[in-house]
Amino acid sequence: MAFFKNLSKAFRNIPAKGQHNLVKILCLSLGLATSSVLIAEVFFEQSFDSFFPDFERTYAINEVIGQDGKINDYPFTPGAVAPGLKQYAPQVEAATRITQTFNDQQCILDDKKTFSANIDIADSCLFDVLPRKIIQGDPKEALSRPYYCMIAASLAKQIGGEVMGKHFVIAGLPGYDLVIKGVFEDFPRNSTLYGLDIFLSSRTYDLMQPGSTTNWVGNDRYSSYIRLTEGARPEDLKNAVNRMVEDHFPAKLQKQYGVSQSYSFTAISDVYKSNPQVKKMAWILSLLAFVLLFSALMNYLLIVVGNMVTRSREMAIRKCYGAGRKTIGGIIFSEALAHLILSILLAAIILYCCKGTIENMISAPISVILFNKGSWILLILCVIVLVLGGIVPGIMYSSIPVASSFRGFKETRRRWKLALLSVQFIAAGFLFSLLLVVSKQYDHMVNANLGYDYSNLAVLTVDGANMSDNERCINELKHLPQVKDISCSWELPIHGQSGNNVRIPGDDRDLFNIADLYYTYDDYFKVMGIEIIQGTGFTNGLDSLSEVMVSESFVKKMETVAKWGPDIVGKQVMISEHSGLNNKRLTICGVYKDIVLGSFNNLDERPSVMFYYSHPAGSFIMIKFHNMDDKSIKLIYDKSKALFPDKQLTVSSYSTLVMNEYASQKSFRTGVLIAGCVILIISLFGLVGYVSDEVQRRRKEIAIRKVNGAVERDIFSLFFKSMIQIAVPSLLVGVIAAWVVSEKWLMLFSSKITLNPLYFFAVLLVLLLVILGAVAINCSRIATSNPVDYLKDE
Amino acid sequence: MIKVENLCKSFRTEEVETIALNNVSFEVADGEFVAIMGPSGCGKSTLLNILGLLDNPTSGKYWLAGKEVGNLKEKDRTDVRKGQIGFVFQSFNLIDELNVAENVELPLTYMDIKASERKQKVQEIMKRMAISHRAGHFPHQLSGGQQQRVAIARAVVFGPKLILADEPTGNLDSKNGEEVMKLLTELNREGTTIVMVTHNKHDAEFAHRTMNLFDGQIVHE
């Protein structure tokens, strides 16, 4: 009963003057809201693919390739490996492989309705290894017969009606009449397979790419998975792997080609979280969450400790009338509980109001990340808040002697308050320094020189367009006055490239792997602004599938591995996919300056090659404008839509594509900014509370100083001096910590900024000015007041 | 030194107006020692605060050393006060975080005086007040009499023309009180003008003359 009485009084006294309860609640709620999202996000990311039944014995297969003295693990294998391993290893209970085929591809149903889908190829053992609830159909049948497929439940809902047996074609692959033979439950957000809408049977893919699903060497594009029997471990498969490799790619042959091949295994629940980016981000986000929550909690304690001066008399009176330790403790605990309840409610409101922003940053619905297995840690955090905020102050209040309270208890626990304030300053220094580094790195990546000129460049893609469609499009668009040049390409440099191996005549060795940009069209180098440094490049209209352009680093590589000289125009090479089984020789007709392939998140440092075709065979039409703006992009869209009213098409500026590659860094930057602002707000609240307590404590001293000749400036400098003594070392610690964390974070990028001490010094200075500004505002009243007002109290 | 004419001071709240001083007029010559006496609440401390430029009168005029200072802003009051007026309070009003030497030095730190010169002045005055042996001690380590001697040292270290003392012996025993009054008399003999508020008739006898205040008015001198 006493507990509920105390609790209701605690709620009633929330607006009480002098206790700063609203500040306590606001700071605590900000800390809880931001740290809960961060913690939930970390737990969510760490939970990837651990929802599968028996995930502990499910593994992804990695291909281990040695070439050029280097050994690398790749998360993809040739098509035969997964089923092959099941044949060789009795410990393998089930095996499957999938491969991405079409991304956001337009599909057309029999009734001419269209939908977009992400399409992968899968074999009939998919759901043996990676189980999902089967809503309709039999996966064994649906994924083993040609032209059959299974679709996700969300896609089925989008299509509407009874989907089983419905026919459709992929716009870019009109010759294949596909039929829906099953529906599976969507993969959840915390899965690497999230977003997959259609699994085409591997037999269908055998028709598209004969031999792909059964080859042992090369064409390593498959994500392969195995489930082991109970008690088996990956180490038990070593012999089976060795036998399998020896049977299909013997050591002798490996030596001849200058490569080595083997396989390793990663637990499926570790695939995502073992990514260095994911690991580092988890570490950084956890640190941010800890800093935020700790600061909010310390601020709460700071205010509570500060209130002791004003509340000590109240507690003394209670003690005079019989209140013991338990009673005092109960009052303080009830207050802390009331504050916590209101903070949680306010945090929930903040999260709800900022739902859109948060979900954009973390790319998942907020409900998904808050209500998962990580939710228990949020509960623990609340308990910690209650213990530290409710029990510790109660003990402190109980220890103040009654006589001291009536004689005017002077709170001598300044060191506590300074320590708590110091922690908040450290956090602010850390976060804002980190923010500066993240912003600079983001700007560096987005504005970096990629080796080609993408200013005024737009990219048009038309789903399902063939060569003659592209030609029509190019002929229509190139005459527009806004268009300077136009070309077509198979690939975009900003995207990842597949690879092929390079050999030279008379040598069986695979010398090295190259990034293959495949076929380009007329004027491609001109449109992209890529500099040709040797030879003259391709000749427009002159078809020669025997010619290849290579990058500068290709030349350097050949100097090392093949002892070629610097002039290589006219020399001949074989490139696996293009030379085929006949070892067709390709003549190098030019060398272009190196361009950046991929993004700085995932830079592809391989040498690259390009081919030419006299018809626009690629998926991307590149349009160079004289001056590009939104109107010109819309014009392209409208003109193209007029040509292809039934096709899905997109027009994007190349700059947008570049920025999209760094969306996660932008989100991280926003996250750090929000966290930094929250910390600063909390710190400033704490600082305001501290300064007003100090002004109260020192009011007599200030009055005496003023009586003895001190002016406003002298009073300000009194407070500034004591604040600088705390703020500067604390900010310095925060800034140094940010330096250390920044160095670790920057290791994620292949191209990074250089950390300049001046950045950190600037942050320290700005924060110091903000702190001193807050101090000045809060002590201005006493600095400008009549000292008599304060001496009268005395 | 001091001339006040029809000085009035009232304090107003939402419901009540209290008249603390009601048309007070008097003069204090250079080098005089004047005692102001009266019952509690008669306006003695209010008058002293106005004389010390710690407060402004509601109406009336106040000249200090020939300059009208009655309606100055806080910053200007501080400028006038600095270097001219020393204060001695009943409850000493020493700063607990500063030691004796630092408390005595306090007014000098606001007067653009070099550190070496400040040190010399402090040492001289502490010697005179017989508190040199306590230079490094803090106020809570001193007796009442010693604290008041420190307060007097602080009030005179910069050589003010005027000392305002508000019940300087109020918290002291008779022996220490006697010592404090002797110090004040000595300072007055050296030319410092002193205006002292007191309840104590014995202390008032040290002054050249006494003014009696009653309900905010001077009743007789």
Image (spheres, rainbow, N blue to C red):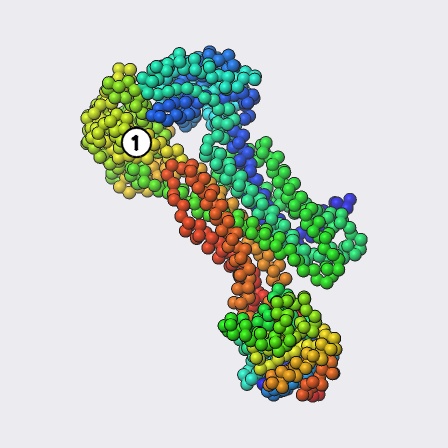
Residue lying furthest right in this view? A322
Residue at x-position 54% and y-position 20%: A57
Residue at x-position 70% and y-position 71%: B144
Residue at x-position 39% and y-position 19%: A261
| Quarter occupied by residue A615 | top left
| Quarter occupied by residue A219 | top left
| Quarter occupied by residue A497 | top left
Residue at x-position 40% and y-position 13%: A246
| Quarter occupied by the N terminus of chain A | top right
Q: Position of residue B170 (x, y in %)?
A: 72, 75
Q: Is residue A315 above or below residue B88?
A: above
Residue A139 shown left or right of residue B165 in the figure: left
Q: Is residue A755 visible?
A: yes
Q: Is residue B86 visible?
A: no
Q: Residues within 10 Å of mark 1 (few under 14, many from 20)?
A: many
**Residue marked by disc 1:** A621
Residue A432 shown left or right of residue A316 in the figure: left
Q: Position of residue A297 (x, y in %)?
A: 61, 47
Q: Is residue A666 above or below residue A727?
A: above
Name the residue nearer the viewer: A97 or A252. Answer: A252
Q: Position of residue A324 (x, y in %)?
A: 78, 50
Name the residue nearer the viewer: A336 or A398. Answer: A398
Name the residue nearer the viewer: A707 or A25. Answer: A707
Q: Pointer 1 indicates a residue of which chain?
A: A
Q: Is residue B202 above or below residue A620?
A: below
